[in-house]
Amino acid sequence: MFLPFCVPPSAESRRQYQRYKLEMMKSWRDALETRLAALNAAISTVEQQISQDVE
């Protein structure tokens, strides 16, 4: 009986998987950078509001 999962992946399929993985991680990073930028803007806004309330 031949089991396909016992065969080591070819170099090309490994490269394809690595490319897929890289694109997925870049997508995650971009999404996190967007959320971080929004969070930083919200923090800045609240800090400005606090400083205006003190004056």
Image (cartoon, grey):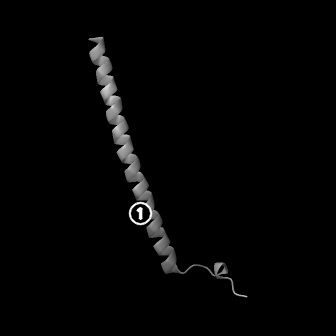
Is 45 on the left-hand or right-hand side of 10?
A: left
Question: What residue sits 40% from the left and 57% below the top?
Answer: 27
Is 42 on the left-hand or right-hand side of 4?
A: left
- Residue 16 percent coordinates (x, y): 46, 74
Local SS, label 1:
helix
Is 38 on the left-hand or right-hand side of 18?
A: left
Q: Which of 15/30 is in front? A: 30
Looking at the image, the residue that sits furthest to the top is 55
Q: Quadrant of residue 3?
A: bottom right
Q: State the quadrant of the N terminus.
A: bottom right
Question: What residue sits 39% from the left and 50% below the top?
Answer: 31
Looking at the image, the residue that sits furthest to the bottom is 1
Q: Quadrant of residue 49?
A: top left
**Total numbered badges shown on the rendered structure:** 1
For badge 1, the amino acid type reads Glu
Q: Name the residue that disc number 1 marks.
A: 23
Question: What residue sits 47% from the left and 64% below the top?
Answer: 21
Dot 1, how many residues are within 10 Å of its Cα: few (below 14), some (14-19), or many (20+)? few
